[in-house]
Structure formats: structure tokens, C-alpha cells
Amino acid sequence: MSQAAGPLPLGDGQKRLLALRSGQFEKAAEIPALRQCLRHAMTTLLIKPGDQAQLGKTLDQADQYFGLIDGDESQGAQEKLKSLRHFCKEAFRLVIVNRTLEDIEAALKAAQGERISAASALYRADVTADEVVQETSIALVEPPPPENFSSFAQLFPAALVWRIRQATCFFQRTNPMLARTLPKPFMLSTEFDLKFENVVRKIIAPKMLEMSRSVSILETTHKWAEIDTAQFWDILESDSRVKDRVTATWNAVWDSIKQQKQVREKNGEKTTVLVAPKLLLEIRAELEPGPTDHYDIPPIRNREIELFASLPFEFEHKLLERYWIRLRQIYEQEMDRRWYQDKAREGALRDSLLSAFMSFPDQVGEFLALLCYYNFPNIDLFFLERFTHNRGSNDAHRQEMVPYMMRFIHQKAADEVRMQEKTEEAARQVEAEKMRREAQAAEAG
């Protein structure tokens, strides 16, 4: 994408399209989401058969630039995002400047989140199949590949992190075309994930080796330099006694970090309080969101410790992936149907989410529901709030059963977001009715 000698003036439609896409680039909080956002912007603009060579070249050049910036270790994450957002805006400007008015109007509809109905699509000669059948846009975060290390001391913490990130990366998928302003729950955040990785490497793994000789003695049992982080778990799966020792030690370390009951006496009265041990205070400091972090985490107490301890063993990522495919299909059939899909009954997505609480631990079900909010455009805070009523008969009961969902829907900025979502939904309904009438008129004509 060579830079022109001077920027050509843009028409009104081009300016509106650039402003819409630029706003989406600004809201992409992570590099994978920004890359997906740019790819979507380009593919919804360069849609004609004659555009494919330009589209391929443009995306290849964009991928090269993203790789160059992402691999620059001299820049921090926010500096990289700033540079890449600027690049996306300039790259998109260079492409739209030579597009026809018809191209710009079609791209504006895509940018505004409108879908072409099957009926109206029949009357457009240039419509593409992708416009009619495109799935909900979701950018995945790939878990880390297996790695080799020269010693068991290096491999052991890395293998723990590898196993955990197979699960946590699942919850970091995002819809790059969907801007949510509320801070993400911690399990959905890549920023939290990196901090938790440091906790495992610096605190948990060394404590496991110190606490259990049956774990530390593993160093003498294999040629660990020939075994990668994935094969480490294959070895554990093949020997239940070894796996049980590692699992028991992992749980014992987390148990030792839990708040402990202490009896204190003041003015002759005894009270029982929960006291945080030193390691818990260190972990709280490590996982506290920084000034530039955009995630939310409650005070880390015993409930959160139990969640952290469950990550390597109770978050079955392959089962989660299969369940996610079903949730996505049900969502589209009920709330965002394509012309070729059967219409799902009202409440089908709610019921599928409720079944997740029977298939997984409750906290996994909570984060699945919250993940839907960050990926499915037609799910709003009102949907989440109604859903919590299926998990408890009153507020206190719901706080006990779905604490992370309750914290999310009742956070400080939620009321303002709820009103905004209600306004946007009303506008969508008006637009949908307008498109329905236009399609009917086209069919009648």
C-alpha cells in the first residue's frame, strides 16, 4: 500500500464510511481483534469479482505490517495498538478513495451492522453470497504452541501455563465488529491472562516443587529436554499415580493460599475473621488491574482461589469448543437468522446456556454467558439480567449462584450502557421494519 503524494479529498459517503470504520478500529482493544476488524472492513468493501486481486494484495501487505509491529519488542502493547490503528485508518482511506458511490453505499450498510435480507438480495445483481450467509464475526485467540526446554525446572512451570492457557484462551475470543464499553470480566481478558501466567511461574510452580518431593523427584524420571509442554501432560495422563500427585500438590498449594479463620478478641468479645496469608497478598497485587488495563476482577478471596485451582483440570477446552458451536448456531437461529437457517423458538439460547450449568461447573457457565455478550451483537445487559433470574429466586440467592454475572450487570457504568443498548435496539427495530417493507415492495413490483 504505497503512500500517495497527498491525500485525495473524500466525498461525504467516503467520509462517513471512514469515520465508522475508524471508530471500530479505535474500539478494538487487542491486536488480533484489530487485524480481524481491518480484514472485515476490506472484505466488505472489495466484494466484486474484479476486486479479488486487490483484496488479496491488500490483506497480504496488512498481515506483513501487523507481523512487523507485533514482533517489535521495543514497543509496549498500547504503542503497538496506536501504531496499528493509524495504519488501519490510512490503509482503508487509500482503498476507499477510488471506490464508486455504489460501492461506498454498500460498504456503509455493512459498517452500520445491517444485513441484506434474502428477499431484497434477489433484486441486486452485484450481491455476493457472503453478504447473505456470513456468520457472526468472531476472532479467536490461539493458545500457545508446545515448547521444549533444557531442564525440568524450566519445563514444569511452562507446562502448567500451557495447560491453563488451553482453557483461558477459549474465553478471549471477541467480535471485532462489536464495541462493548464495559470492562471485561477477568476471565475474558488477555491482560489478566498474562498476569496470571506470571503468578503460576513465580509463585505456584516454585511452591509446588518446594512442598512435594513426589513432584520435584520427577526431574530424575525422564529426559525432559526431549519432551515439550504438551507431551508433559501426555506423560501424566499415561500414569495416573503421577498425575494424582501433581494434581494433589497443585490443589494443596492453592489451599495454603486461602484465607484462614482466626479468632480475635477485642474489648472482651471474640470474633472470627478471615485473614489473608502473605502469598495471597502477593497474588492480589500481581493480578490487580493496572491504569491501562481494561478488565474487572473482584477482591480475590477463597472463591476466586478455587476458580484458579480448577483451571488446568475442570475447563475442558475441547468440550467448550463443541458447546460454543452450538451456542453460536442457536443464537443466530433465534436472534440473528440467516435466510438458510431454521427459526429457533424464543428462549432457545437461554435454555442452551442453562444446560451449560449442568454440563460444566457453575463458574464456567457464568463465563460462557458473559462471553456470549461480548460476541453476539443482539445480546444485551437486559438479556443477561433476565437470565440470572433462572439461577436464583431472589437477589441474595443469585449473588450466591452466579456471583460474576451479578457483579457484571450491577457494575457502576451498567445503567448507562443499559439505556444506550435499549435506544440502539429501538433503532434497529425501526430499520428492520423499513428493510422489510422495502423487500415486500420489491417483491410486489
Image (cartoon, rainbow, N blue to C red):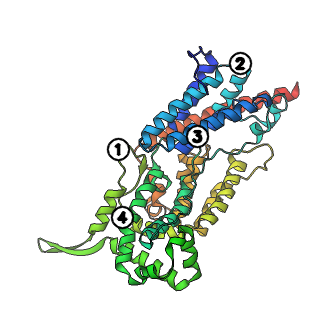
Where disc 1 sits, the SS reads loop
- Dot 4 corresponds to which residue? 202
Q: Where is residue 60 in the image (x, y as percent from the top left)?
A: 65, 37
Residue 235 is drawn in which quadrant? bottom right
How far apart are the alpha carbons under marks 2 and 4?
57 Å
> In front: mark 1 or mark 4?
4
Q: Is residue 428 above or below residue 195?
A: above
| Nearer-the-camera pick, 203 or 370 | 203
Residue 268 is drawn in which quadrant? bottom left
Q: Which amino acid does label 3 sit on?
A: Arg
> In front: mark 3 or mark 1?
3
**Mark earlier in primary sequence (2, 4):** 2
Q: Position of residue 378 (x, y in %)?
A: 62, 44
> In front: mark 2 or mark 4?
4
Do callouts 2 and 3 mark residues in contact (Cβ within 8 Å)?
no
Using a 10 Å C-alpha cutoff, classify the residue at mark 3 as few (fewer than 14 neighbours), some (14 to 19) or many (20 or more): many
- Dot 3 corresponds to which residue? 35
On the picture, is 385 further left or further right than 445? left
How far apart are the alpha carbons under marks 2 and 3?
26 Å
Where disc 4 sits, the SS reads helix
**Mark earlier in primary sequence (1, 4):** 4
Spot the residue most to the left: 267
The C terminus, quarter of image:
top right
Residue drawn at x 58%, y 35% is 424
Residue 284 is drawn in which quadrant? bottom left
Residue drawn at x 41%, y 71% is 153
Q: Position of residue 140 (x, y in %)?
A: 60, 51
- Dot 1 corresponds to which residue? 291
Does the image show residue 328? yes
Residue drawn at x 51%, y 69% is 312
**Mark earlier in primary sequence (2, 3):** 3
